[in-house]
Amino acid sequence: MSFTARMRDTYADLFEAFRTHPFLVSLRRGDTAREAAVAYVGQDAAYLRGFERCYGLGLALSPDPDWQAFFIDGAGLMLREEPAAHRALVAPFGVDYDAVQAEHLAPAGQAYVDHMLVAGHDTLGVLMAALLPCQWTYTWAATGALEADEIGPGHPFAAWFAFYASAECVRLVADYRARTDTLAEAAGPAEVTRMERAFAVSMHHEIAFWEAALTGQTWHSLPARVLAGR
């Protein structure tokens, strides 16, 4: 079994937790609250800036021009095309995308980016394992929603699902998986263990990112148990 196939099997519960999170469920239903959609888009735009910095680390670790092209092309996709997916979430509310840009990441997003940046100072395999869940979960969930006919005509967020289920994104995920599998095959046991850890942590961060959007998490918000003790 390949590394990524094993990750999909081992962490099937995290994939399902991602798919069934109330925020993503609301996107599929088309009834996401305005505040949650705006919070998510602002944070995801800031997160992608951090993700692109991780691509810079990938360039530094690239062993050949093919790998360099992989990171350059991937960064181009995020810069050129992914903002359209963000606009698709706020446009139904009459919200200007440029007006919702977040200057700073909330705790969940910052923790996720920090995790990937640390991975980028390990090996290329560890970095790829840390980056993969972001690409994989979105395309997997969007493709599944379309295949299940959950995104019908007139769905307010149809363009968001269409982007992540696009042939370009599907090809990107397949390339990510193939490259990560190749790196894992060449890695020693210790590095493979670090790759798995990086993958699992990123999966948890993906779910936490949904939760932060749903709750409007900020650096000033406190857990309910802390507030209750005041």
Image (cartoon, rainbow, N blue to C red):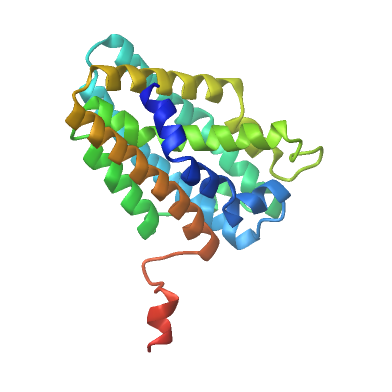
Instruction: State which quadrant residue 193 falls in.
Output: top left
Q: In this view, does 221 lie above or below 166?
A: below
Q: Position of residue 58 (x, y in %)?
A: 27, 26
Q: Where is residue 201 in the image (x, y as percent from the top left)?
A: 34, 45
Left or right: 204 with respect to 89? left
Seen at 46% across and 33% down, the residue is: 8
Left or right: 190 with respect to 17? left
Q: Which residue lies furthest to the bottom in this view?
A: 230
How many labels were placed on the picture?
0
Q: Where is residue 143 in the image (x, y as percent from the top left)?
A: 63, 31
Query: Would residue 114 be visible to someone looking at this image?
Result: yes
Left or right: 26 with respect to 223? right
Query: Would residue 101 be visible to someone looking at this image?
Result: no
Q: In this view, does 46 lie above or below 144?
A: below
Q: Residue furthest top?
A: 65
Q: In this view, does 134 lie above or below 221?
A: above
Seen at 40% across and 18% down, the residue is: 178
Q: Quadrant of the N terminus?
A: top left
Seen at 43% across and 40% down, the residue is: 11
Instruction: State which quadrant residue 76 falls in.
Output: top left
Seen at 60% across and 20% down, the residue is: 167
Instruction: State which quadrant residue 154 falls in.
Output: top right
Q: In which quarter of the image is the C terminus?
A: bottom left
Q: Position of residue 26 (x, y in %)?
A: 66, 53
